[in-house]
Amino acid sequence: MIRSQVAEGAGSIFNSPPQRVAIVGAGVIGLACALYVRRAGLPVDVYDTLAPGEGASLGNAGIIAICEMLPIGRSSILRQVPRLMLSTTGPLSVQTKYLPFITPWFVRMLLVSRPAHVMRLSVHLESLLTRATSAWLDLTKNSVARSLLVTNGWLKAYQTPSNFAAAVAESKQLKDLGVKLEVLDAANVHDLEPSLIGLCGGLFFPEAGNLRSPLSTMRALAEDARRAGVVFRRAKVARLAGSPHAPRITDAAGGETPYDRVVVAAGAWSRLLLRTLRIDLPLDTERGYHLMLPTPERSLTRPVSLPIPGYTLAQMEDGLRLTTGVEFAGLDAAPDYRRLLRMAQHARTVFPGLAQQPLSKWLGFRPSLPDSIPVIGTLRNYPAIVLAFGHGHLGITLGPLTGQMVAAIILDRTMPFDATPFSPSRFGV
Ligand SMILES: Cc1cc2nc3c(=O)[nH]c(=O)nc-3n(C[C@H](O)[C@H](O)[C@H](O)COP(=O)(O)OP(=O)(O)OC[C@H]3O[C@@H](n4cnc5c(N)ncnc54)[C@H](O)[C@@H]3O)c2cc1C
């Protein structure tokens, strides 16, 4: 069915098939795009200032969160925003200086937060998330990365009956969308994760998976790509140039390289790059932190999130990782680890086995659009440029599927579902 919708503006309007593809960004999205485009037989260059996987794709919680079908901008979350903004211990913080910059983004989020919009956006997310696990399995077949991918479910746990009851009430919407979940009482939670205490209930998502090390997974994917012939160029792309059908990449030294297609998979920095074409999208960053702690004697067997106060604990191959909620402070502000350290103090109250002394701290930049829906598609006025960013909290989950979609767009192939909701045209570009 969906050929023209996916390929909107691409493929068919070109005189000949693409010969040479550039991908800007070697995060999970860029790597998956590189592998799928290369598997289709096209030469691929990947540009990144960092080594592959060392942007946001390095330090996340690694959850293949196929159950996250509700957009962030929904009333149950938004009505808490004023209170959360004033709290020093909650999952959300906004740097005062950044408030004028993030306000238009919030307004856009508010505009799509009414139930009818939330329902529509959930259906779009569902069409991606139901395909995410099989895309991961496909991308990692015959790869070392497969050994780092486990499916042991994901637990969201609650400390107070009122928070638990609210989560159970909201979970009905997930059930309606076909998400498999189990409501657990305190004893069930303890059976599942005996090292945790003081929890009164939880939601368990048995089909969620996780990566035992996002960075090792990214390195394995990069190695697969290299072996397949993808060329990694350690360079900053300073600007995009050229004509609509013949894009060029300009590096920081001013050198220009022509390509038949360019994929913008530069995560939270994608907006800066597109501005060089005088194109603007409402992309911002939801910053998130992690703290690595030594592996406890009795650790967790699956990722566990405490949505309130807002952190996730996940055992990785090199220690236990605590990841935090969201900070709005843009791409340039220095890290502020105070909230992360407070979260770690809180985590010790539910997980007494947690060490005091951290191994390391990290700040990362989620690339986030206000409707929680990534852009995956070609630009109306630059049909040779494919956008693939804005995955927010779900980049790890949706990386491989995005790679499949981008390859389908570049090769003018059909996709088994309607990809028009992800087109940049929803932002008028
Ligand atoms: C704390 C935290 C926890 C998270 N947990 C999860 C989770 O459990 N599950 C999940 O699905 N997602 C999670 N995420 C989200 C996920 O990490 C991101 O959505 C995903 O990594 C984004 O991937 P990306 O490839 O778009 O961006 P990135 O990984 O940031 O890659 C973009 C790359 O582009 C490069 N780049 C940018 N501009 C240029 C340029 N001009 N020239 C050259 N290179 C450039 C950057 O150097 C970077 O390497 C989490 C994020 C955070 C911060």
Image: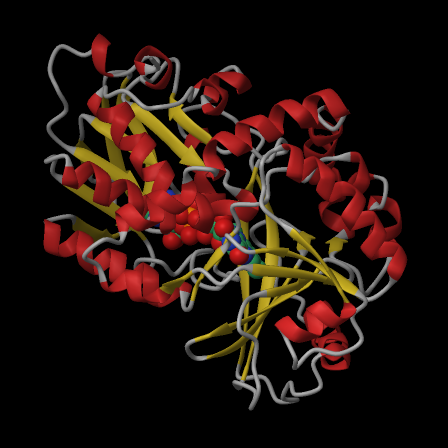
Q: Is residue 252 visible?
A: no
Instruction: Give the residue displayed 61% in from the left and 63% down from the top.
Output: 334
Residue 5 left/right relative to 153: left
Rendered image coloring scheme: secondary structure
- At a point 33% along the width and 31% down the height, the residue shown is 405
Nearest the camera: 188 or 419? 188
Q: Is residue 347 among what the camera can see?
A: yes
- The answer to which quarter of the image holds residue 342 is bottom right
- Residue 413 in which image quadrant: top left
Residue 19 in percent (x, y) is at 10, 28
Identify the residue at image location x=74%, y=49%: 97
- The residue depicted at 20 percent of the width and 24 percent of the height is 411
User: Residue 15: horizontal and vertical position, in percent?
Assistant: 13, 10
Residue 311: x and y in percent read 67, 64
Q: Nearer the viewer, residue 11 or 140?
A: 140
- Answer with left or right where residue 127 lies relative to residue 355: left
Please tell me whether residue 408 is drawn above or below residue 62 in the rendered image. Answer: above
Quadrant of residue 1 within the rendered picture: top left
Instruction: Please determine whether, in this image, residue 360 is positioned above or below residue 377.
Output: below
Location of residue 136 in the rendering, given as x and y in whole percent from the top left corner:
34, 49
Residue toward you, 142 or 322: 142
